[in-house]
């Protein structure tokens, strides 16, 4: 479970995150929904200890990622916005490297990579260098790398960006399966269809603040709108939100 309270983060004069408070439960997919520049990526980077918050608090399964960054990483799987693959390494080598960082023994690591190959259909390109991979291939490798140590909590920053229809469907099926297994999943996105298809709870962020938090039905009731897209526009207070 993730608990955040009153997170703030500035970069010089720019206040990227002004006041973000939300909970993300195990066995659920929590969506961070907002227009580009709303503060979603900065919030995720604070969750996985890449950035320290200026103020506020974070607890992931009771652990403060700023005080115990190494400890919290054992329970976290992260798919960052840039994917972060090493271009000169093969897909297998990228996954194995992160497995080694997590202390997985060689025989166990080989078995785990074989399992991930099956789950994510990596066989066709597992031993190719990742340089030149398509977006779908890059996302699948990044997911395998994030899952190699069997983390309890998964953080994904706009994972479906640039994916084709079939890759998007496969990603959704994987996330729903992980949810059913009891994982805590936080998904940052600005794609309404993704939120509607996946998220049990939606945290709407605009201008660095949480402006609404609830299920899709709760947000529709709160906004007085029948469609989720209309509810989103109403709650962020801008007709330009979906065009950003």
Image: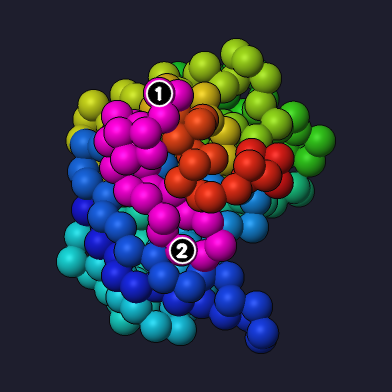
Write the residue at 79% across / 41% down: 131
Instruction: Identify the secondary structure beneath mark 1.
Output: loop
Image position of 134 (left or right of 49): right
Q: Is residue 216 magenta?
A: yes
Q: Quadrant of residue 12?
A: bottom right
Image position of 21 (left or right of 99): left
In front: label 1 or label 2: 1
Q: Seen from this angle, which residue lies furthest right?
A: 132
Instruction: Identify the secondary structure beneath mark 2.
Output: strand
Q: How far separated are the C-alphas under marks 1 and 2?
A: 24 Å
Work out whether mark 1 precedes mark 2 in sequence or the reverse, and give the earlier one: 2
Q: Is residue 208 magenta?
A: yes
In front here: 132 or 17? 17
Q: Which residue is mark 1?
A: 226
Write the residue at 21% across / 36% down: 27
Residue 242 location in percent, x, y?
64, 39
Q: Which residue is mark 2?
A: 209
Give the answer, above or below, for where 49 lies relative to 191.
Answer: below
Write the residue at 47% across / 59% down: 44
Residue 138: mark? none
Image position of 209 (left or right of 122): left
Q: Seen from this angle, which residue lies furthest front?
A: 224
Write the residue at 46% across / 84% down: 54
Q: Magenta segment range?
A: 200-227
Q: Are marks 1 and 2 in contact (CB under 8 Å)?
A: no
Type of colouring: rainbow
Give the answer, above or below, for where 155 lies relative to 128.
Answer: below
Give the answer, above or below, for where 198 lies relative to 42.
Answer: above
Residue 244 location in percent, x, y?
70, 46
Q: Residues within 10 Å of mark 2 (few under 14, many from 20)?
A: many
Residue 57 location in percent, x, y?
31, 75
Residue 220 location in percent, x, y?
35, 32
């Amino acid at each position: 479970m993730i608990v955040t309270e009153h997170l703030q983060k500035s970069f010089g004069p720019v206040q990227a995150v002004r006041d973000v408070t939300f909970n993300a439960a195990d066995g659920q997919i929590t969506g961070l929904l907002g227009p580009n520049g709303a503060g979603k990526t900065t919030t995720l980077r604070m969750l996985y200890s890449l950035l320290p918050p200026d103020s506020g608090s974070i607890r992931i399964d009771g652990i403060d990622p700023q005080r115990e960054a190494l400890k919290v990483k054992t329970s976290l799987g992260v798919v960052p916005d840039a994917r972060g693959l090493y271009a000169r390494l093969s897909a297998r080598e990228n996954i194995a490297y992160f497995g080694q960082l997590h202390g997985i023994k060689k025989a166990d690591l080989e078995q785990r990579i074989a399992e991930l190959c099956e789950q994510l259909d990596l066989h066709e390109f597992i031993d190719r260098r990742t340089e030149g991979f398509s977006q779908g291939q890059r996302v699948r490798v990044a997911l395998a790398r994030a899952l190699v140590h069997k983390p309890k909590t998964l953080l994904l920053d706009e994972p479906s960006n640039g994916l084709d229809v079939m890759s998007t469907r496969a990603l959704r099926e994987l996330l729903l399966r992980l949810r059913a297994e009891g994982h805590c999943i936080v998904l940052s996105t600005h794609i309404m269809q993704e939120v509607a298809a996946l998220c049990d709870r939606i945290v709407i962020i605009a201008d660095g603040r949480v402006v609404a938090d609830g299920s899709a039905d709760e947000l529709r009731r709160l906004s007085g709108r029948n469609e989720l897209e209309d509810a989103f526009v109403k709650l962020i207070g801008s007709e330009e939100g979906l065009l950003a």
